Amino acid sequence: MSPKMQAIADLKADTITSIVAKKVSVHSELITVDSTSYVGLKDIVDHHVAHVIPKDKIGVVLPWVHIAISNAKRMLLHITMILIRNIYRTTLMSFCYNFNRRYFGEVLFERLLTASISNKNHFRYN
């Protein structure tokens, strides 16, 4: 069984309609917001209800959709921050190494040898 959620390239009506046609039963009832991206949905399911939602009622209509989207955004933001921290740390370490190695001159090989011998690995064989 394939997952119901997936990343899409754009919000064009053709893209959304083709994905919904593959993922949703013809006998389903869809409740969506009123968007031009969803105009083709009425042709592929038995019943499609599109709501115009005022800004002050966003959490009232389709509340679990908004909760799911909010949770997904929070999780993606957290993962992004972890990746940025790791990339930042690695980039900073690389910069420091490149900046400091210019002073090694002819002892560069000895410095590399010392660094490789004194490095403690953080993995073990099972």
Image (cartoon, rainbow, N blue to C red):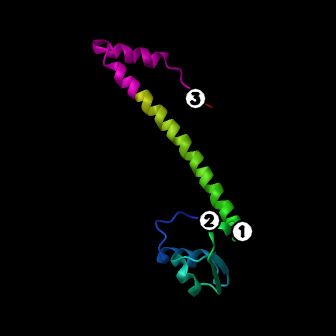
Query: Would you say the magenta stretch is mainly helix, strand or loop?
Result: helix
Q: Is residue 119 above or below residue 126?
A: above
Q: Nearer the viewer, mark 3 or mark 1?
A: 1
- Pick whichever, 5 or 2, lies toward us: 5
Residue 64, placed above or below residue 94: below
Q: Which mark is residue 123?
A: 3
Residue under the point 30% across and 19% down: 102
Residue 62 counted in the magenta span: no
The CA distance from mark 2 to mark 1 is 26 Å
Q: Earlier in the sequence, mark 3 or mark 1?
A: 1
Q: Which residues are magenta?
A: 95-124
Give the CA distance from mark 3 to mark 1.
51 Å
The amino acid beneath tag 1 is Val
- Count of numbered tags: 3
Q: Nearer the viewer, residue 111 or 59?
A: 59
- Count residues near mark 2 (Cα–Cα under 10 Å), then give few for <14, some for 14-19, many for 20+: few
Q: Was residue 116 drawn as part of the magenta stretch in this picture?
A: yes
Q: Residue at x 48, y 15 (%)?
A: 118
**Amino acid of disc 3:** Phe
Give percent across and percent down for residue 93: 44, 27
Q: Which label is found at residue 3?
A: 2
Q: Can you give x and y, in whole percent of width and height, for residue 52 in the image? A: 61, 77
Which mark sits nearer the N-terminus, 2 or 3?
A: 2
